[in-house]
Image: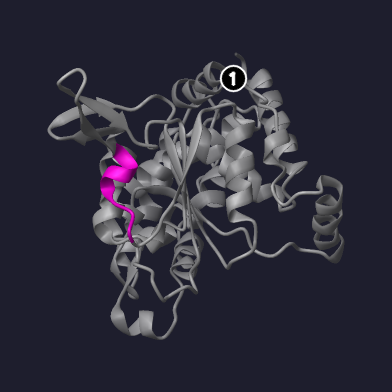
Amino acid sequence: MDFKEMKEKCDRILKAVGDVFVGEESLLRKLLCASLANGHVLFEDYPGLGKTLLSKVFAKTLGCKWKRIQFTPDLMPADIIGTRIWKYKTSEFKLEKGPIFTNILLADEINRSPPKTQSALLEAMEERQVTIEGVTYRLDQPFFVIATQNPIELEGTYPLPEAQMDRFLLRLRTGYVSSLDKECEILRRRIKWQTDDPTDKIKPIVTVKEFREMQLKCERDVYVDEQILQYIVKIVRKTREHPKVEVGASHRGGLALLKISRAMAASVGRDFVTPDDVKLFAKDALAHRVILKVEYALEGVDTGEVVDEVLQEIEVPKDYLPR
């Protein structure tokens, strides 16, 4: 697969998702790039903005196996990863795999389960494996989590631990549509579908093998100049030095920026990364990894504003080599 074919496939995927979900093209492309980077995505926004619909549409479009977990306060870790069950007829234990054994896991309202249940995802999100009663099982590739949560829901919710937040490649917000016509289009499509869930009619655009090939293309064939690497590191290090920040972005934050920038380049048919690729994803990849000092958090300072200030302070490289 060359980069021209890569771009064509990405464009077809974006069109297929856009035919169902009404939203900004930039949001759809960011989600696509995160999947090409084999990274997990957290959708955090108000109720009713289509987070779950977008996740389901996207999963079905990629042609990958996908499963959905509705997180609730009584959900247990075994309900996610599975458990070994005694079979009377064969007089032996048999592994009953949980829904985490899939390619794309939709974790709906992930903050409605307690930390014990959320921790069941940590090993899978970082190492692509799960351990059940001392035995480790590798997960199929690709594997990534698309999670949703409502920020204004407080009753019956549990904030995600910082360790888990750090495992999400991007934190995205769907937001309200930008125009009156787009909001009317949501209603028009509902009339056309005659159902609240049109995902049953979605046909895959690529196969699992093709999608995996696209991921490997991003990983192996997209060039990153030394100046771009230094630019990424300077941004990450600057978040740790900001006067409003208690804990800045981790090394995983720099790796996230690197992977998502390469995926962005490949998605538009380019075999090298530019500073604009890095800047486009800096806030989405780093803001949720930054912890503010208490006084600024109480004042309502947004970590995204901190990342914006950092980007303004770091000089953009101009003499990088495309290849």
Please report the residue visible at 59 percent of the width from the left and 55 percent of the height from the top.
51
User: Can residue 319 be seen at all in this image of the molecule?
Assistant: no
Q: Is residue 234 left or right of residue 2?
A: left
Query: What is the residue that sits farthest to the front in this orientation?
Result: 89
Q: Is residue 14 left or right of residue 82?
A: right
Q: Quadrant of the N terminus?
A: top right
Number of numbered discs overlaid on the protein picture: 1
Q: From this view, report whether residue 96 is shown above or below residue 253.
A: above
**99 and 318: which one is in front?**
99
Residue 25: give x, y in percent of width and height.
Answer: 71, 47
Quarter residue 123 falls in = top left
Please report the residue visible at 52 percent of the width from the left and 32 percent of the height from the top.
36
**246 and 17: which one is in front?**
17
**144 and 283: which one is in front?**
144
Label 1: how many Cα within 10 Å (few below 14, some 14–19, many 20+): few
Query: What is the residue that sits farthest to the left in this orientation?
Result: 134
| Mark 1, residue position | 207
Q: From this view, report whether residue 193 is shown above or below residue 284.
A: above
Residue 40: give x, y in percent of width and height.
Answer: 43, 43
Q: Is residue 171 magenta?
A: no
Q: Which residues are magenta?
A: 74-81
Disc 1 is placed on an element classified as loop
Residue 181: give x, y in percent of width and height.
Answer: 87, 61
Quarter residue 50 falls in = bottom right
Going by the numbered disc 1, the residue's amino acid type is: Thr
Q: From this view, report whether residue 12 is shown above or below residue 276.
A: above
User: Can residue 323 be seen at all in this image of the molecule?
Assistant: yes
